[in-house]
Image: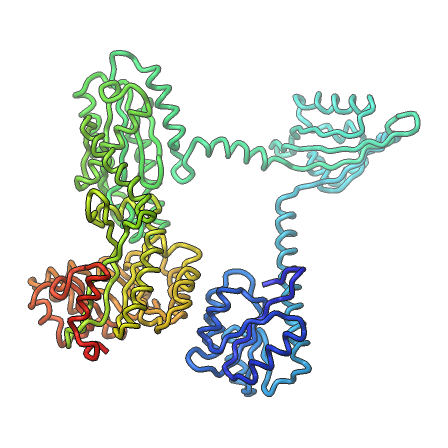
Amino acid sequence: MLADSNEKPLILVVEDEPVTRITLEKILDQSGYPVIIATNGSEGLSQYIEHRPSLVLMDVMMPGMDGYETIQAIRNYETEHAVPILMLTALDDPESIDDAFNSGATDFITKPINWGLLTQKVKYSLRASEIEEQLRTSQSQLIYAQKLAKLGYWEWDAQSNHVSGSKSAFELFGLPSHHRDLSLEQFLTNITPKDKPMIHQAMAELHQGQASIQVSFRVMQPDSSLTHIECLGEAFFDSDHNIIRITGTAQDISRLHKAESLIEYQAEHDRLTDLANRSSFSRTLITALKEKPSNSLSAVIIFDIDRFKQINENLGQEHGDSLLLALANRLNRVTRENDHVARLGSDEFAALLQNIDSASDLNIMINRFNQQLKAPFIINDRELYVSYSFGIAVYPDDANDAETLMNNANVARTKAKKSGGNQYIFFEQGMNENAHEMLSLENDLRKALKNQEIEIFYQPQVNVETLKPTGAEALVRWRHPTRGIVSPGLFIPIAESTGLITDIGNYVLETAIKDAGNWHRAGYQLHVGINLSGRQFSQNNLIEKVQSNIANIDYNPKYIDLEITESLAMSNAEANIQTLKGLKAMGLSISIDDFGTGYSSLAYLQSFPIDAIKIDRSFILNLDSKEGKAIAQTILAMAESLDLDVVAEGIELDEHVNFFRGKHCHLFQGFKFGKPMPEKDFSEWLKSYNINDLN
């Protein structure tokens, strides 16, 4: 990174040999450079992430992570400017030099180090880095300016009535570039007749002594298209205040006009589907209810796609968008001309059905609407069947205003969703009580962390052969002051939809790492599994968050096992692989949770830097069938071929234990060996085992 103009660049020295390290620090300090020190590669990576130095001096041969591995980890972490890294090496063979540059080194310094040339090498490396960054910035600004500005220069000589200027100016005024010897009238000939009075007004103001003009107008181009022009000019006068000349610029602002029109349109419409958006639909509904005939009914339908998140993850973002676009097109086809449809957000849509004569007619329309939307879609050359959760509110029976009508339709939709989906439900007054209950729960959850109501429970993991504890999975629980323990199945969806899951996940990460440290100090070398939510994993600062939590631990980070679900891993596989590599570079273990439910690509799975897979509990519960056993055996065989450890979740019976023993399975987790329990209870549970038996 570039140094601040008022500060000397910070230099990171990563060197395990004490004499060399001390000498480097002393010489750099004498040259005025602030220095931070690391004695090995892992510490060097941590220091880099924390301090973001301007230059790195990196030894090659170090215990643990060597210099090549550390440079690769730094390069994987960097997102913008590439910090110069000078490799310190006693190896001068071509192969070693190639390894240095292939790992990402900027240059190398051979040992024994020529101390007199060292500071010069550092100085010019920093200067080259600064020049490179300045060039990159200047080039970006130039490209942007050239793309944005469509400017032309012109000048009118009042005495000769002659207009001169740049080629681009004549083109902007719709004139052939070879016609340069023109009078002012000829120069302005293609301005639209409606706009010419503005030009005359501007000239009149100049003759009255005004020194400059700014006027916008339209020009008819030779191809009959219109160009919007903004013209600026400055007048020069003689001693008698007569105009000598006017010098100015002309700029094509057609794109600005289009942008203004587009902004106005987008303020009313959804960009993907081109349907009306929520605010536009609300205004339309207000107007429609005011104008509704008194002897007719109107109905608002709010609906979403069942299991859309899973569909989107399996199809990919592009095909998920194709589904939403196809649904929007179908909505336009199946609704009547005086009905209105909108996309409210994500996979949530709305329809306003108007001028309905009776309740029976409404039922007929809704049944037809439902059936027409259920017809399969062709996405990526495959048939895709989709179901929906519909909520319906009727005016004036269910509400007398637009806002309440939409709220009631949404309450009914939520009821349909929670009842399993694939259905439509009409609003009933009692539904609001449940909606208020969920809102109350959401409000309480927002205060739960602050009030120390969020707890971490630990479920034991045991060795398959010895059945002795080797680790635990950290599971979040909410101990509500009046409700008691709230089911994760109830509050986790609320946390995810509100974004609270990020703060909760960070709390779980911090707490579980601290608890694991306490167990290690007590003599238990246990792994701790920590789940990362989708929102956590998509955060730009995830690596920094994890690094800050493990920076001061006094045990090997390999005992920290970060778990992500298979569907999350596959949601953006290429980008996720890079994130996982960054986490892996810190020495952490990586596991894929709920394996078998996310339709992994084997090619991608081979690319993931993972250590273990956790067989989903649903497969364990199905072991009493021939098909269930076959699936489990297939997963075990695949894991063995990829050299991955296997954790079997949901172990409850002796039959489950017997099935997995002797196969490629390493850990058991389930009620047979222990339910999730608070940290205090888990620590007491550990004491029932001999420490020597656990290590």
Nearest the viewer among 46 and 19 is 19
Residue 645, image x and y in percent? 24, 72
Q: Residue furthest toward the top? A: 294
Q: Residue furthest toward the right? A: 239
In this image, 59 relative to 399: left or right? right
Residue 218, image x and y in percent? 65, 29
> Which quarter shows the C terminus?
bottom left
In this image, 188 relative to 106: left or right? right
Give residue 355's quadrant in the image: top left
Please indicate, yes or no, whether residue 644 appears anywhere in the rendered image.
no
Q: How is the image coloured?
A: rainbow
Q: Reply above or below: 651 against 278.
A: below
Residue 374, image x and y in percent? 22, 38
Give residue 171's quadrant in the image: top right
Residue at (21%, 79%) from the top-left corner? 692
Q: Reply above or below: 363 against 567.
A: above
Q: Reply above or below: 152 against 107.
A: above
Please indicate, yes or no, whether residue 629 appears anywhere in the rendered image.
yes
> Which quarter shows the N terminus?
bottom right
Residue at (22%, 30%) from the top-left corner? 432
Nearest the viewer among 54 and 511 is 511
Residue at (20%, 36%) from the top-left corner? 416
Residue at (77%, 30%) from the top-left corner? 212
In this image, 101 relative to 406: left or right? right
Give residue 445's quadrant in the image: top left
Q: Reply above or below: 417 against 191.
A: below
Residue 490, image x and y in percent? 22, 45
